[in-house]
């Protein structure tokens, strides 16, 4: 799934308490991609490294640096997410619900990434098992995703707040 969709889904699912909660959940929704591909992408945009050609679709994954693969494994693992969630809960003495947007990111990626390019390693480091899903760029996934995001966003962030203002 694209990074913006992850942020919005995270905010809808875990960031509706306040504006601050929205942005914290949005951050955790985009964080797995930001901390894996984002570093490499920013480096290519700044001209620090050269990147593969994306114009014809996803490139051969061997053209992506190994550190991106390692970071992707870490940031897209439900095992790592659960450990981090529990650790934050212990340190804070209460859960940080907005962190759930990270877990939602992983759950959304499992069926929307094909085995051809960065399948979601949701059981890493225990197993390299993955699902060969339908790419999020496929209209079968992309169009319903955008439609549902627009509908839920309209409901939660406009209609529901407008009704609260009337009470």
Image: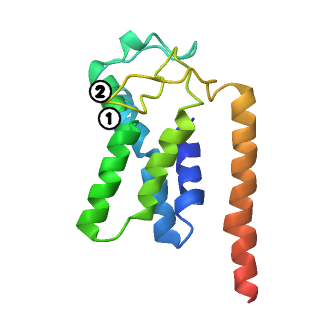
Residue placed at 47% from the left, 14% from the top?
53
Quadrant in the rendering for residue 72: top left
Task: Pinpoint residue 51: horizontal percent, then vertical percent.
Answer: 38, 18
Label 1: which residue? 74
Does residue 108 appear in the picture of this structure? yes
Task: Pinpoint residue 166: horizontal percent, then vertical percent.
Answer: 76, 87
With respect to residue 133, does 166 lie above or below?
Answer: below
Callout 2 touching callout 1 (CB < 8 Å): yes
Task: Pinpoint residue 21: horizontal percent, then vertical percent.
Answer: 47, 67
Residue placed at 36% from the left, 17% from the top?
64
Label 2: which residue? 70
With respect to residue 3, does 110 lie above or below?
Answer: above
With respect to residue 164, does 23 lie above or below?
Answer: above
- Left or right, residue 127 beside residue 111: left
- The circle on residue 62 is none
Residue placed at 75% from the left, 79% from the top?
163
- Left or right, residue 63 beside residue 105: left
With respect to residue 52, does 147 lie above or below?
Answer: below
Q: Secondary structure at mark 1?
A: helix
Does residue 29 appear in the picture of this structure? no
Quick one: label 1, few (<14), some, or many (20+) residues within 10 Å?
Answer: many
Q: Secondary structure at mark 2?
A: helix
- Quarter holding the N terminus is top right
Instruction: Return the residue nearer the eye: 117 or 38.
Output: 117
Quick one: label 2, few (<14), some, or many (20+) residues within 10 Å?
Answer: few
């Amino acid at each position: 799934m694209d990074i913006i969709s992850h942020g919005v889904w995270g905010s809808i699912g875990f960031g509706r308490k306040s504006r601050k909660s929205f942005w914290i959940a949005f951050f955790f929704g985009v964080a797995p991609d930001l901390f894996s591909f984002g570093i490499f992408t920013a480096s290519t945009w700044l001209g620090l490294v050269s990147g593969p050609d994306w114009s014809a679709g996803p490139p051969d994954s061997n053209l992506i640096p190994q550190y991106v693969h390692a970071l992707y494994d870490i940031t897209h693992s439900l095992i790592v997410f659960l450990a981090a969630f529990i650790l934050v809960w212990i340190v804070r003495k209460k859960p940080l619900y907005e962190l759930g947007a990270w877990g939602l990111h992983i759950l959304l990626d499992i069926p929307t990434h094909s085995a051809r390019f960065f399948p979601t390693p949701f059981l890493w480091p225990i197993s390299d098992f993955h699902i060969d899903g339908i790419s999020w760029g496929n209209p079968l996934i992309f169009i319903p995703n955008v439609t549902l995001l627009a509908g839920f966003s309209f409901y939660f962030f406009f209609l529901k707040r407008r009704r609260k203002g009337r009470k």
